[in-house]
Amino acid sequence: MRRLRWIGAGVALSLAAGASQAAVMGDIAIFIDFVGWIGQGTAQLAAQQILDNQTVAENAEIVGGNEIADWVEARIDDGKMDMIITFGGFPDDLYAAGNAEPDGSLAEEFLYGGNFFLNTADYIFYYSNGIQNGDVALKNITNSNFDMWTDGNASQPTPDGEKYLPSMGNFSAPARLQARPDRGQSGVGD
């Protein structure tokens, strides 16, 4: 399970564009209806570990099917920082498959309401209910030019990373989140 924790930490996406608005950790929804390379059984095991061990959220639960949209709508602007954890698959009730709703999706509203997503086991938002969105979904949801493609995988901690996790050192990050000024916009809000 140590490997699973590092994968989750390494690929975590906390694009809380409005996070400064949210002062208190709210709820956690774990979505496992569709998963990436991790496999359904491993995703279920990881979800159970999160449920059994998390101590920061008011409530943590597995939310899927038609319930996920209602869960999000109830928390978009609740003044708390809520989180959705995914394992490579993303619910099309939050972002329409095939990039059918490139602007104004529930995923985008949730993010800009001071909430965040944490994903592992694939490129975030790449698939909605098994249908490919490609890397465009990340750009659409965040209104940015972010991508997770890398040309060479060598990474090093930032000054904050060195301060808070001094044992980390240089590492390999084959799908790290990055703004790509060479591909247009320079970041969120441009």
Image (cartoon, rainbow, N blue to C red):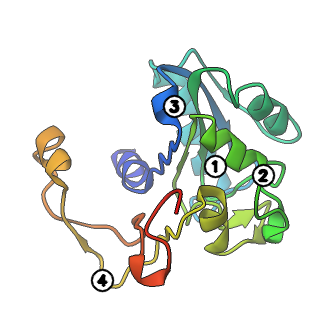
Q: Residue at x 67, y 66 (%)?
A: 137
- Is residue 168 or residue 18 the one in the foreground? 18
Of mark 2 and mark 1, the one earlier in the sequence is: 1
On the image, numbered disc 1 is attached to which residue?
A: 41
- Which image quadrant for residue 26? top right
For label 2, the SS is: loop
Disc tally is: 4
On the image, numbered disc 2 is attached to which residue?
A: 105
* Viewport quadrant of the N terminus: top left
- Which image quadrant for residue 72? top right
The residue mark sitting in front, 1 or 3, is 3
Question: Does 77 sit above or below residue 185?
Answer: above
The residue mark sitting in front, 2 or 1, is 2
Determine the CA span between mark 4 and mark 1: 31 Å
On the image, numbered disc 3 is attached to which residue?
A: 50
Q: Residue at x 67, y 52 (%)?
A: 40
**Image spot of residue 52 (x, y percent):** 52, 23
For label 1, the SS is: helix
For label 3, the SS is: helix
**Image spot of residue 136 (x, y percent):** 65, 73
Tell me the kind of residue under disc 1.
Answer: Gly
- Is residue 121 or residue 23 the one in the foreground? 23
